[in-house]
Amino acid sequence: MNYLAPSILSADFAKLGEQIKLIDTAGAQYVHFDVMDGNFVPNISFGAPILKSIRKYTQRKIDVHLMVEEPIRYVEDFAKAGADIITVHAEACKHLDRTIECIKEQGVLAGVALNPATPLSSIECILSKVDMVLIMSVNPGFGGQKLIPYTIEKVRKLKQMIEEKGYDIDIEVDGGINKDNVTEMLQAGANVFVAGSAVFGGDIEKNVHAFLEKLK
Ligand code: DX5
Ligand code: ZN
């Protein structure tokens, strides 16, 4: 099954509830929620209180992407605020295994994310414990960047790794995904597609429909 996860980082924050309803009724399966701490990444976005507020606007899965140092400190807050999936960066955790266990103890799905230049070998040991791997296709921190081409091959290799082990793990791609490159990522093995500027720039409903058509 393929899923579209619009990143609300590119939404109009003054109309956030309204725009979340719009992507939901248009058929997007997830809401991607980018948390940035100004430390792990150079930008600052939003935190758990905002998640709690938007939880009321949708029944869709809220996919929380924590771009923060030592995310274990915030796992409980985001789970309580209504996250369905919590993804942490391997690069940001001193104790990745403990952090993944902590997410699972909260009763939510656990994801691990890798920056473009972080090798797949860094998550080999944790693979059996996660529900999703997020491959960053840009350097995290900002919406509207261009996809880094070598990350497509990385997705292909990850898919092969997962199949060889016989695991059931989603592969999410995030950064620079648009209607022109989504099919290549799909063919490489990804099945969860984050899109920020390509969904919220222009006609939101039309954009969601166009993506969903390509993900059929
Ligand atoms: C980047 C974030 C992304 C971002 C994607 O650091 O993790 O989720 O919002 O935005 P686009 O699709 O515009 O690259
Ligand atoms: Zn993200």
Image: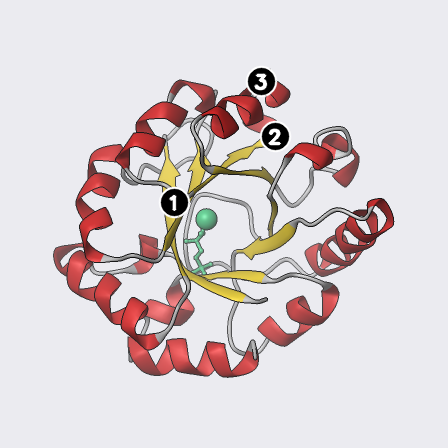
* Above or below 44: residue 197: below
* Above or below 76: residue 190: below
Q: Residue at x 45, y 24 (%)?
A: 71
Q: Residue furthest left?
A: 14
Q: Residue at x 41, y 35 (%)?
A: 42
Quadrant in which the N terminus appears: bottom right
- What kind of residue is marked 2? Ala
Q: Secondary structure at mark 3?
A: helix
Quadrant in which the C terminus appears: bottom right
Q: Is disc 1's CB within 8 Å of ligand 2?
A: yes
The label number, if any, that marks residue 34 in the structure image: 1
Specify whether residue 194 is in view: yes
Between the residue at mark 2 and the residue at mark 3, the CA separation in whole angstroms equals 12 Å
Q: Earlier in the sequence, mark 2 or mark 3?
A: 2
The total of numbered circles placed on residues is 3
User: Circle 3 is placed at which residue position?
Assistant: 98
Q: Residue at x 61, y 62 (%)?
A: 191
User: Circle 2 is placed at which residue position?
Assistant: 90
Disc 2 to disc 1: CB gap under 8 Å: no
Q: Is disc 2's CB within 8 Å of ligand 1?
A: no
